[in-house]
């Protein structure tokens, strides 16, 4: 069936196309009599007419669409970022175009280039891949020349004029280390499960520094580098917990990996927290429903997403604003998965 047009509405209501346009654009009050306006509205309803969003965007230059690139849609932590972005965007009358890089740098480059060709009003990205990809940096440079508003959610120490909303885990990890050391843990291991090592440096470095400050040597055998999935976290935990002198506490660099650690501990007959204390990061929703409830570090991902949209909309409204960097400090949430070191 042919899509109804403004001309169809004009014919049915017996008015000019210009009159239909006035009614649709909210300009009818001063130009169109009330009875005529009602005839146009009745014709719109009878025909099921809806304005063509593509044509409107071409005329106005605005699409009311925001692009969002996340690293891994399988991780609930990134769902929560997306949820915050969607909430704030919807409230402002914007639609969300979501892309997932699936932790693949080549795919991330393709997605980034594809979005650069689309008509969007702004872009929010967790772009750790930009620091490792010359092609991605070239794409970013091109977007900045076009003055596309961009907000970054990962501070990858690349000097570009974009707005940032960041939550650095460094200070919170220092607090995690102080907490575990106060519980007399000295063999503290780390499940370092990332697709890109730079993504968790804000946890690895303060972990190492915290040990040294307490006079505890950094034992590389207690740092298990693996991928970012639950299964990889599970296998890394089995490796560490099977050592002759196993760790009494483990830090998983995200809650998804911590789920794998809990399963590994149970399969080895270890009790959490009696035999093993466990700390995660991100405070995904399931963390407080696990057995035991997970001690973790929260950055309030939904708020991060909402603040990113606020920054983006401010940049859209005033392109010459000074560039902003909003820091949202994470906080340690102590639950049931941590306790004193076993004697």
Image: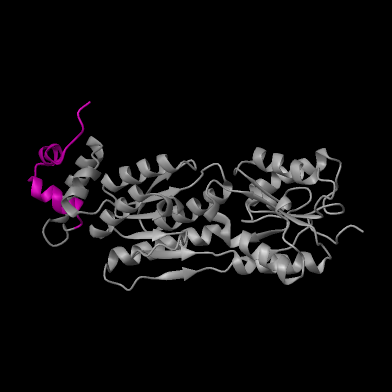
Residue 11: which quarter of the image? top left
Figure check: 16 above or below 149: above
Residue found farthest to the top:
1
Q: Is residue 216 visible?
A: yes
User: 14 or 96: nearer the eye?
Assistant: 96
Q: Position of residue 282 (x, y in %)?
A: 61, 56
Figure check: 70 above or below 214: above
Give the magenta part as a residue range.
Answer: 1-26
Question: Is residue 3 toward the left or the right of residue 217 in the image?
Answer: left
Instruction: Residue at 80% x, 53% y: name it.
Output: 247
Instruction: Residue at 21% x, 32% y: name it.
Output: 3
Question: Is residue 244 toward the left or the right of residue 189 in the image?
Answer: right
Q: Position of residue 95 (x, y in %)?
A: 36, 49
Quarter of the rendering occupied by the N terminus: top left
Residue 340: which quarter of the image? bottom right
Q: Is residue 36 visible?
A: no
Figure check: 78 above or below 172: above
Instruction: Residue at 39% x, 60% y: name it.
Output: 151
> Count the marks: how many?
0
Quarter of the rendering occupied by the C terminus: bottom right
User: 76 or 159: nearer the eye?
Assistant: 159
């Amino acid at each position: 069936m042919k899509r109804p047009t403004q001309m169809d509405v004009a014919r049915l209501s017996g008015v000019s196309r210009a009159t239909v346009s006035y009614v649709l654009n909210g300009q009818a009050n001063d130009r169109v009599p009330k009875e005529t306006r009602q005839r146009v509205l009745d014709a719109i309803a009878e025909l099921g007419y809806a304005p063509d969003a593509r044509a409107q965007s071409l005329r106005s230059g605005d699409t009311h669409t925001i692009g969002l690139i996340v690293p891994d849609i399988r991780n609930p932590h990134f769902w929560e970022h997306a949820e915050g972005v969607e909430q704030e965007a919807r409230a402002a009358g914007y639609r969300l175009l979501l892309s997932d890089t699936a932790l693949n740098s080549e795919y991330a480059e393709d997605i980034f280039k594809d979005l650069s060709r689309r008509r969007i009003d702004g872009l929010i990205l967790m772009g750790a891949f930009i620091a490792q990809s010359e092609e991605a940096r070239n794409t970013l440079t091109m977007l900045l020349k076009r003055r596309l508003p961009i907000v970054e959610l990962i501070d990858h120490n690349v000097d570009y004029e974009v707005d940032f909303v960041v939550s650095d885990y460094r200070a919170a990890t220092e607090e995690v280390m102080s907490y575990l050391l106060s519980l007399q843990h000295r063999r503290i291991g780390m499940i370092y499960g990332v697709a890109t090592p730079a993504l968790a440096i804000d946890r690895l470095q303060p972990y190492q520094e915290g040990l040294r400050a307490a006079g505890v040597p950094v034992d590389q055998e207690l740092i298990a580098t693996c991928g970012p999935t639950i299964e990889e976290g599970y296998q890394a935990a089995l490796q560490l917990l099977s050592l002759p002198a196993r760790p009494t506490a483990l830090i998983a660099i995200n809650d998804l990996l911590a789920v794998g650690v809990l399963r590994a501990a149970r399969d080895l007959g270890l009790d959490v927290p009696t035999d093993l204390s466990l700390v995660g990061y991100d405070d995904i929703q399931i963390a407080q429903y696990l057995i035991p409830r997970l001690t973790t570090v929260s950055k309030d991902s939904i708020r991060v997403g909402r603040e990113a949209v606020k920054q983006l909309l401010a940049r859209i409204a005033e392109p010459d604003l000074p560039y902003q960097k909003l820091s949202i400090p994470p906080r340690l949430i102590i639950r049931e998965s941590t306790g004193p070191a076993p004697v």
